[in-house]
Image (cartoon, coloured by chain):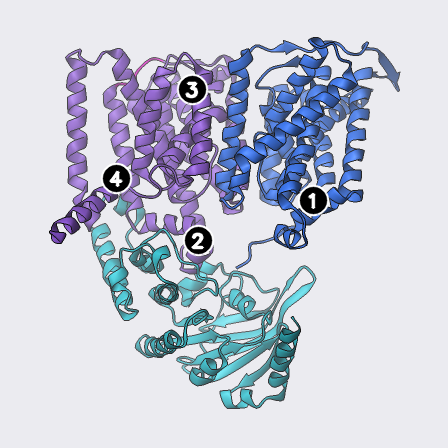
Amino acid sequence: MKKSKQFWPFIGSAIAAYAVIQLLISMGILDDFYSNILIFMSINIILAVSLHLIIGITGQFSLGHAGFLAVGAYISAIVTMKLDLPFPVAILLAGIMATLAGLVVGIPSLRLRGDYLAIATLGFAEIIRIIFLNIDYVGGAAGMQVTHMTTWTYAFVCLFVTILVIVNFTNSRHGRACISVRENEIAADAMGINTTYYKVMAFAIGAFFAGVAGALYAHNFYIIQPQNFGFLKSIDILVYVVLGGLGSLSGAVVATVLLTIVSTFLQDYPETRMIIYSLVLIIVMLYRPKGLMGTMEITDYFKLWRSWKGDKQHGK
Amino acid sequence: MEWLQQLINGISLGSIYALIALGYTMVYGIIKLINFAHGEVFMVGSFIGFISISVWGLGFFPALLLSMTACAIFGVLIERIAYKRLRNATRIAALITAIGVSLLIQNGVIYIRGAQPAAYPDVFANTSYNFFGAQISSQAILILSVSVALMLILQFIVHKTKIGKAMRAVSHDAEAAKLMGINVDNIISATFAIGSALAGAAGVIFGVYYTKIDPLMGVIPGVKAFVAAVLGGIGIIPGAMVGGLVLGVVETVVSALGFSLWRDAAAFIILILILIFRPAGIFGKNTREKV
Amino acid sequence: MVNDPLLQVKGVGIQFGGLKAVSNFNLKINQGELIGLIGPNGAGKTTSFNLLTGVYAPTEGEILFDGKRINGLPPFKVTQRGISRTFQNIRLFNELSVIDNVKVAYHSLAKHSVLSSILRLPSHFSGEKEMEKKAMEFLKIFELDKYKDEDAKNLPYGKQRRLEIARALAAAPRLLLLDEPAAGMNPQETKDLMELIAFVRKEFNLSILLIEHDMNLVMGICERIYVLDHGVLLAEGTPEEIRNNPKVIEAYLGEEVHDEHA
């Protein structure tokens, strides 16, 4: 029941944050550069949080998140550019088609685990990329022109819905079932959890939001190409989740914000950026394999702090 | 005779995959780590060969030996610095670290010398022989003979020498091997050294045969070689050789049929089918988790 | 129908490769019985548990629970039919809190859907409240309620064992399989545990099948005992009969002699 008490403050502060930023944008205080960073950050957070559900919560190690992003990007671009339908329809269809891809990719997770699953998902994402590379309708290797349609409002609404859905899912019997799969699949099975169902469910929900992010991503640039969705893109997203802490949603958000800022400054030095990313992966795994926050959430730290403060006052 | 030609091309490509796959399979067999950085060792080996030949003016065989030695050292360094402390970590933590090491080497090389490709110098006069109507280049013969020779040497090391026996013991049961007085750390390092030397050799051969090398050249052959290792049954040395050859031939056939853009997908489709239907590979035995 | 046994195992066996781990295993448990399954190390006790709970599909024979075939069902379906278990090597959900461990087991008895949870519909809140209430009841019985927000991995060993049993009970079984529940416990803890097992058996009207190494314990509380050796059933009977069975004595003596050599 405690979780529901956090619900309204969360919505309130989210709406306030949105309003403040929207106001700053419309007053011209935040120029295109900054509003672009915010949009980019939102897209990255959606990707990180959706991967967090698959890896952090359900423990299914996926290296193929860029594949779902690609499906969302291309489907949404087809919807707006070829079918001339409105952007919100494109976002929704992007999510739905990515979910279908997620169901397909989720199937090997029924038989594979750990590093083998990671390699299989990597393979799936590459196959998706190669399929787009070979379809002339979407421009093949040259890519596809897309009109800029993503605004701060779209990005924010999608981000808000993503976090709300994934937090609500996680804090329910269904989320606990997913965590039990992560913690001990054999025991989860023995406790009556349909582990197959929840693994595929995690892939489907995660893929849906990656697809949504794909729609925002495609319409935030002027062109999408298969090469944008390679293995390295999956690694980008993985770094957010790993750095934040496998199992911590707020950790993933914090890490994404930090790394998005870092990579914005390093935009013109891609090798330096990748060297930093790779060092982050190595150092975190060697010295803090649970990431910055482990499975803790920011709210847990508040609770700890409060009880610590409480103890101190009792001491006096 | 078109088909014979393609078969020869496929075997040439496949023997490069096989050389790289051996390193994957040996390392996985011994510490259950997918050494993602292995493709980068291959790339570094190729560059060392390039420098030896074009800057220092060495011949093919001295360059090959130099590259193999340097890669052996490089492989051991990677193991000692990055992987050693992960022995007791989860396999996922180890895999993430390996991906990190791989990216670090790639981008480190780009940082040092830039991303532009280099053209491998000619070390052999490129003569062709007619063999039942198929054109076989001297380079194809070279690739094959060097690869076969290296694989024979590897078989000898693994089956006839003390260190090879120790390697097999450690991969069978590291704990028991330790109790029998085997220095497990040294054996793991030796495995990395041998696997990396083979990758270095593959790098030089690749450069001579395909003539263009660049810092990202290790990514695709690296992943393909991993597919080859899985295909043959990861941890099984002859499996990696057969897996590499099969994959090389399949890819060449896919290209020859006019689907060259789908060539990379073929490897991944094979990978997924193998993982789903026969995860232990062609030569492997299926095992299951103990409850 | 009332007199039909709850669980009937008929000629069940399983092979791994060429090795017969268990063969021609027969067992019958009536409603409310407490049965012991004993045997030397490697006799196939845990394997037979894995067969009963669907972890392994038997290569021969059939298993009837409540008159219906359950062999070939995946473990979660076997559990939903009413067979729940603990593990010899504790398998808790380490990073989940104590109460959440129990809630996971209550999962399939709750009804609120994924959609109701995502949209936070009233059925989500009532469902979660029900789960919280039920889970607390089990924790209180096992005196774990004061640890409810602790991560399971932080519990002391003996309490982890108790939590595993509490969790197994929360899945609302009619047959509970306990795989060495007292392993690693001191005599006092073992005694408390046994009293607890007797209590929950009455309270929840359970049948229990128990693997245990501690002979005195098994002889003390079980009504009937099955003895496995090398994957085959060696003997079956009351504790008194088993105690005096020459084959059983030989199997155990053989093990002791063997142990001295090892």
Return the residue at label 4: A298
* Residue for point 60% across, 85% down: C249
Chain letter, blue in picture: B
Left or right of B19 in this view: B291: left
Image position, residue B279 (x, y; %) = 61, 44
Return the residue at label 3: A273
**How far apart are labels 3 and 2 at the CA level?**
36 Å
Give neighbour class at mark 4: few <14, some 14-19, many 20+ (Cα, 10 Å).
few
Q: Mark 1: which secondary structure?
A: helix
Q: Mark 4: which secondary structure?
A: helix
**How far apart are labels 1 and 2 at the CA level?**
32 Å
Numbered label attached to residue A184: 2
N-term-proximal mark, 4 vs 3: 3
Residue type at the position of mark 4: Ile
Residue C113 on the magenta span = no
Circles 4 and 3 on the same subunit: yes
Give neighbour class at mark 1: few <14, some 14-19, many 20+ (Cα, 10 Å).
many
Return the residue at label 1: B167
Q: Mark 2: which secondary structure?
A: loop
In the image as oriented, which residue stretches furthest toward the front?
A316
**How far apart are labels 4 and 1 at the CA level?**
47 Å
| Above or below, comparing residue C69 to residue A302 in the picture | below
Q: Is residue A208 visible?
A: no
